[in-house]
Amino acid sequence: MSLRQPTLFFLAASFLSSCNSSINEAQLASTVDATQGSAKALYDSGRAAESSGKSKKAIKIYHKVSRSYPLSDSAADAKFREASLLDLSGALLEAFEAYDSLLSKYPASPYYAISITRQETLAQLAAGGDLKNPTFIGLKTRVGAKKATEMLAKVRDNAPRSLSAARAQFTTGEVWKNEKKYDLSIDAFRQVVRDYPDSRYGPEAQFRIGKILLAQGLEGNQDSANLERSHRAFDDLLLRYPDSKQAGDARREIAKLASNEIQRTYDVAEFYRKKGKTSSALFYFRETVRKSKPGTLHNRAKAWIVKLGG
């Protein structure tokens, strides 16, 4: 073989490869154009059905466009029209999911802002008990707490740096509080403070934590551990948000806690005094005096210390 033969071979191979590449690109472009054409034709049929008042048919067509041609130029338009028609027809849970699909699949679409706003509205309605869930026998029931918080989580995650995210997380805490799921409520409020500390919901979330712990501490035999945790929660609020409206509320709650603690100490002293256990009574009367400022309990405790020979 001459020296020129390998060169000619590689030139020929390069030419054939270039031709094949051009053919493949042309075939791909043709396929894309055909797909776009099919998607557009199907979308247009949905618009025609919608214009004729056939909303259910239009919804099905729009859903098929986004499902069958998810990468087409018509997909985002179709998904938004589907969500909007479901919304207008009152199928609000289905509308929520359609908006969610649009937000997750087409975040760059021109419908993003309006979709996140409407999705948040639906989630907040569900959380407030104002969004109903159709049953298989045609009745409508309130959306449960679990479903409502799942909807709120999607709102939060679809726009994690927005005010709607902080609001959704705060509402999650309220939902669980209303359901008396206090541990879940506290966790949700803590996430507001942790993830959205500078939002307007931060101070109120911290205050709610303190109030829940306080309510738990005052129940039954007065759980001192929860009372202490409540005190710390209010202290944390003063450290984090000293200039907030809630800071004043926290100071008042701390003052009440201190007053209640003094009253409990005095009551314990009285209990031991009536039982004739003088040394124990004196200990708690002294504690009452130490913890309190001059006033009714302070003066009573001092008087008993003198009477009991303390």
Image (tube, rainbow, N blue to C red):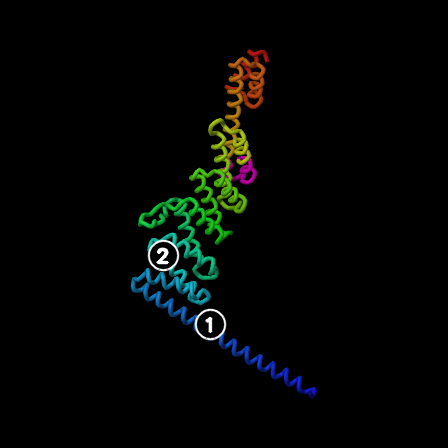
In which quadrant is the C terminus drawn? Answer: top right
Toward the viewer: 33 or 114?
33
Q: Is residue 126 left or right of residue 290?
A: left
Mark 2 crowd level (few <14, some 14–19, many ≥20, 10 Å Cα): many
Identify the element where label 2 is drawn: helix
Toward the viewer: 212 or 182?
182
Residue position for label 1: 32
Residue position for label 2: 86
Toward the viewer: 252 or 269?
269
Identify the element where label 1 is drawn: helix
Which region of the structure is painted magenta? 234-247
Q: Compared to 231, does 31 lie above or below?
A: below
In which quadrant is the N terminus drawn? Answer: bottom right
Q: Is residue 272 left or right of residue 78?
A: right
Q: What amino acid is found at the position of numbered circle 2 in the picture?
A: Leu
Location of residue 84 in the rendering, given as x and y in whole percent from the top left corner:
37, 58
Location of residue 71 in the rendering, given as x and y in whole percent from the top left corner:
46, 66
Query: Which quadrant holds residue 239?
Result: top right
- Residue 284 appearing in the image: yes
Q: Does the magenta segment cover residue 245?
A: yes
Q: What amino acid is found at the position of numbered circle 1 in the picture?
A: Val
Toward the viewer: 276 or 203?
276
Location of residue 130 in the rendering, given as x and y in whole percent from the top left corner:
36, 46
